[in-house]
Image (spheres, coloured by chain):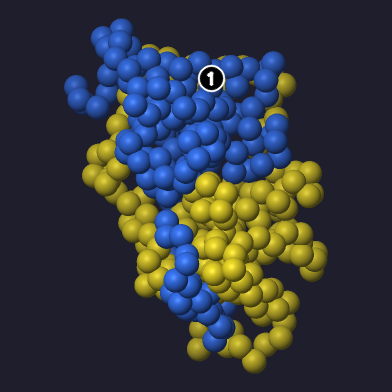
Chain colours: A blue, B yellow
Amino acid sequence: MNKNIVESGEDKSLDTQMMMRTLELAGKNASSSYGGGPFGAVVVKDGKVISECGNAVTVNNDPTAHAEVNAIREACKKLGTFDLKGAILYTSCEPCPMCLAAAYWARVSRICFAADRHDAADAGFSDAFIYDEINLPVDKRSIPTEQIKLKESNMPFDTWKENDKKTLY
Amino acid sequence: MNKNIVESGEDKSLDTQMMMRTLELAGKNASSSYGGGPFGAVVVKDGKVISECGNAVTVNNDPTAHAEVNAIREACKKLGTFDLKGAILYTSCEPCPMCLAAAYWARVSRICFAADRHDAADAGFSDAFIYDEINLPVDKRSIPTEQIKLKESNMPFDTWKENDKKTLY
């Protein structure tokens, strides 16, 4: 048995408790009384829940409002920081590339998920498709994508390098 | 010459105008008087600018507040939709995986960028690193990541499938 996969009932650790919490959030979110997408996420630090959110894409008209992004944004707001080092992100389903990259930018220390990208695909979500697209060369992707390289293209980076009052992140 | 790369001065089309606008936003954002990261993005639909945003990670304490995510969220809010079909996303630098996936979820019809992920790396940003991490198997990534598969893992998707009032996205 894969040591990273814990069957329900065998382990009542923080991991299992927190994963059950994300699944309950996701299930509630998926029900007709709420109407968001079937996903939930919880950010935990020092054994305490900092934030817990469901997917809110359709209810907020925000395509970036996945459960993980919502939970990361809320945790940062509550802690007054853009750096979640030491935090664990629990999510009901394997993060899509947007949410995975958000977790990297937030520098969480660990990520745990229950269902995976293939389960999401079976339920009609594009996570696996977007993982595949990200690996394609820019000119092979399904959304037409072009580099328009102007002589000013690196000006913002030059300005940034010269800014001695900048906040690094 | 790559047909997708237009040198400044040769073309004053909408593409070049909009790209200059993202670079001006990014440059302003990178200067000491503002303090955000050196990135800008503009969403255009039917030839009109719907939103234009800079990076606001450090100023908003939000690691997801990249220019593209901000511009997508603002455009959706203004248009009252989570679907940006027909819109073009212009950005001063190749979208990181978070922003690229956000553009896919928002279903923009085209993406144009000026600098690329390697220019971003030269300026100290992790875009190229995160592109590499996304391709790794879950157990090989630098942020420890685990699947904790419970017997309830697919319950939210089952609830979703049974919900006949759901809003698909």
Point 67% across, 20% down: residue: A34
Residue A74 is situated, as x and y percent measured from the top left of the image, at 54, 35
- Amino acid found under the numbered disc labelled 1: Leu
Point 29% across, 14% down: residue: A13
Residue toward you, A9 or B167: A9
Point 80% across, 66% down: residue: B48
Asked if one can make out residue A105 in the rendered structure from this viewpoint, the answer is: yes
Residue A96 is situated, as x and y percent measured from the top left of the image, at 46, 41
Residue toward you, A21 or A80: A80
Dot 1 alpha-carbon crowd within 10 angstroms: few under 14, some 14 to 19, many 20 or more: many
A41 left or right of B147 in image: right
In the rendered image of this protein, does residue B46 appear above or below residue B27? above
In the rendered image of this protein, does residue A43 appear above or below residue B56? above
Q: Which image quadrant is residue A161 in?
A: bottom left
Residue toward you, A20 or B112: A20
Name, please, the residue furthest toward the top. Answer: A9
Residue toward you, B137 or A22: A22
Point 58% across, 17% down: residue: A28
Circle 1 residue: A25
Name, please, the residue furthest toward the bottom. Answer: B10
Residue A101 is situated, as x and y percent measured from the top left of the image, at 43, 48
Q: Which image quadrant is residue B56 in?
A: bottom right
Residue A25 is situated, as x and y percent measured from the top left of the image, at 53, 20
Chain letter behind tag 1:
A
In the rendered image of this protein, does residue A120 appear above or below residue A30? below
Query: What SS does tag 1 mark?
Result: helix
B56 left or right of A169 in image: right
A132 left or right of B43 in image: left
